[in-house]
Image: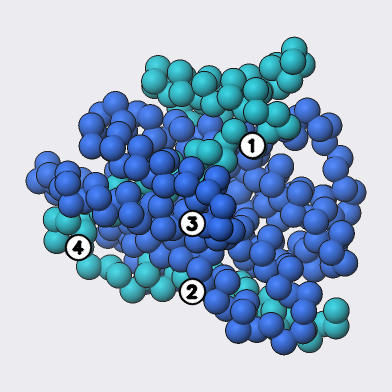
Amino acid sequence: MNNTQFFTYLLIMSGVTYLIRALPFALITRKIENKTIRSFLYYIPYAVLSAMTVPAVFYATSNPISALAGFAAAVVFSLKGCSLTTVAVIACACVYVTELLV
Amino acid sequence: MNNYIRGLKSGIPIGLGYLSVSFTFGIMAITLGYTWWQATLISLLTVTSAGQFSGIKTMLVPGNYAEMVISQLTINVRYSFMSISIGQKASTRFSGLKRWILGFFMTDEIFAVAAAEKVVGAAFFAGLSTIPWIGWTLGTMVGALMGNVLPAKLLSALGLAIYGMFIAIIVPEMQKVRPVIWVVLIAVALSCLFYYVPVIREIPSGFSVSICAIAAAIVGALLFPKDFSDEEEAYDE
């Protein structure tokens, strides 16, 4: 691929992605008062993250058993109130150990 | 400065999780015929997983510019909602140019951690973005230059880092606010549909995540509108 084609595509890809992120961030600065919209925005993070996690998490490692073990560990240690980093590290460790055993 | 450092630390698990994905991206880019610096530049300037994986295939065909715009828009539209959501939580001094610059870093994972904050400051957000950005770019470069340098078992384990983080964000809120359980269940059910049911599973994952999340959050907002009266003071801090 020649450089002109590469850089044109790169400009479009990164430009579009940037604008999708930055435009609403920079332009919607007023506090939204509408209760339904505010509730929607409150629920959005949890909705996005759960849709991204299940079922993709079960295919994130080299086999579903280790993924399930990591998933279970993450849920248990989240319930105990561990921090994000702690939960992430424990989940990874659990996957690693499971794959050594299975 | 303290907030920047605090953000930096919060970004460590994201950066680690990005390594395994960006290695894969680097390797795939080389396989498709890109050079190592092209792959690295794409990651440095775009910082998005699904969008990049789809983008480097679109780029192979000359003159596919309209398709590139449309596919990036659909795959990445979820970021707009994240930006609005974080925008509502941003501190009063996190405005103007800071938003134009830092908005660049609104990835799923950075958003997720920022969303767990009561008030999001610019310094914290900048710190939070630093390590993931470096990890994503560096991981791509290493993957492109050296192929898979990490042992397969370690790479496999790192694959769970990001999801572990997501779970640690979702679960405590489910314990605290009951309606979140319903929103999560709806989002999960829809996302399973998009994953397993023939025909609709062909929809690019970035776009299907947007659909699932928006639908679940709308149901939540209509059935369980939240009472915000106790949170007004937090915004002005």
Q: Residue at x 74, y 80 (%)?
A: A7
Q: Residue at x 69, y 17 (%)?
A: A98
- The mark closer to the camera, 3 or 2, is 3
* Quarter occupied by residue B63: bottom right
Residue B208, disc:
3
Q: Position of residue A82 (x, y in %)?
A: 44, 22
Circle 1 sits on which residue?
A59
The chain letter corresponding to cyan is A
Q: Chain of mark 4?
A: A
Disc 2 is placed on an element classified as helix
Q: CA distance from mark 4 to mark 2?
A: 21 Å
| Residue type beneath disc 1 | Tyr
Which of A97 and B232 lies nearest the eye of the viewer? Answer: A97
Q: Position of residue A71 (x, y in %)?
A: 54, 26
Circle 4 sits on which residue?
A32
Q: CA distance from mark 3 to mark 2?
A: 20 Å
The chain letter corresponding to blue is B
